[in-house]
Image (spheres, rainbow, N blue to C red):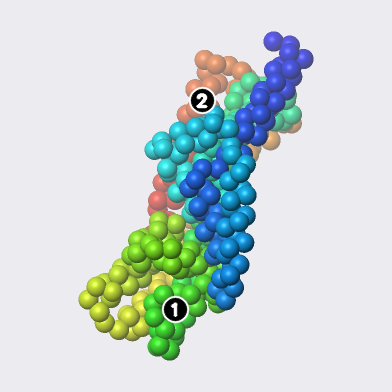
Amino acid sequence: METPQLLVIGVALLVAIGVIVWGVINVRTEKDLIEERLERIEKADMAQMNSLLDIQVEDEKSKEKKPSALALRLDNTLSERGFGKKWRQQLARADLKLTVSEYAALHVIGIFGGFAAGYFVLFGQQLVMGVVSAFIGFFAPRIFVSRKTSQRLVNFEQQLPDTLGLWVNALRSGYSVLQSMEAIARDAPEPTATEFHRVVQEVQLGIDMEDALEHLLNRLDSEDLDLVITAVNIQREVGGNLAEILDVISHTIRERIKLKGEIMVLTAQGRITGYLISFLPIILALFLYTINPTYMGNLFENQQCGWPLLGCGLALIGIGFAVVQKIVDIEI
């Protein structure tokens, strides 16, 4: 197939993807509307609850723009699938305001965009490299969401001891559990403030405290937070001094964070070695292909020998990287 024909096909595919994405972006299910409403309510100051009426008016106006039946059905179908539910949870943990359909559209865009960049721009119309680029483009949204989730979780866990200290002081001042969480939502930094805002608003909307805390744990998959929520639930059932319990947990979490830092320092060399031995062969192969395409071209063009060697090499690199990461991953 000649280059002009490939360009025409590529442009047609991009236009089709653009139309699909335009329809998907306008999709907002009822659950998404509820989440947006909760988020706007959370950002409102607690002393200005009269402004909630204006928010409800805006929600009514937003409902007037109804999505098309096809787009709504597509979003509902994807959301009810197993992978759709998993994607929704991942997006919630990363605090990204995307629907499942939008996230799926990003995967499709990543595939075609990666193939177009690798085939037409970077590697001089090499089909194998175009496929590899499309493969990388498919995983690009997932890598971004994973990094966003990890960074947000680390920030929350670093703030958790100070959050518990604020919680303990509020309880000792005579505040109830809910009032203490309101103080945390008002004074704590992000992302702690946003998460506790959501818990407070869910309780005020009629959701049970235990369920609201369970939702918090689903959004933040943290062992330290699980310990805190378990202590709060037990105290609500059997009674006791919650302030003293949280004070002890805060001390335990501080020591755990300190120990984690020491382990990260001691395992830094192993982690860097794993990254080096994993990515160095790939970078070196791309560099040699750039400066001397003829020398490396046989490896990519020979389907009987070159492709199996590439597959075996990538598989061994992946196994080695996984083994190194398993070795340096020390649980506390």
> Which quadrant is the C terminus positioned in?
bottom left
> x%, y% of residue 45?
58, 72
The type of residue carrying mark 2 is Leu
Question: Which residue is label 2 attached to?
Answer: 309
> x%, y% of residue 62?
61, 48
Up the image or down, 20 lies above or below 44; here it is above
Up the image or down, 76 lies above or below 92; here it is above
Up the image or down, 332 lies above or below 310; here it is below
Q: Residue furthest right?
A: 4
Relative placement, left or right, of 58 versus 228 is right
Q: Quadrant of residue 103?
A: top right
Q: Residue furthest left?
A: 238
Residue positioned 45% across, 74% down in the render: 181
Relative placement, left or right, of 304 versus 253 is right
- For label 2, the crowd category at 10 Å Cα-Cα, with few meaning under 14, some 14 to 19 and many 20 or more, is some
Residue positioned 56% across, 71% down in the render: 49
The type of residue carrying mark 1 is Ser
Say which of 86 and 206 sits in front: 206
> x%, y% of residue 166?
47, 81
Which secondary structure, mark 2?
helix
Question: Which residue is label 1 attached to?
Answer: 180
> x%, y% of residue 73?
49, 32
> Which quadrant is the N terminus positioned in?
top right
Up the image or down, 48 lies above or below 223; here it is below
Q: Is there any visible trace of residue 241 in the rendered image?
A: yes
Say which of 178 and 113 sits in front: 178
Cα–Cα gap, marks 2 and 1: 61 Å
Nearer to us of marks 2 and 1 is 1
Residue positioned 40% across, 58% down in the render: 215
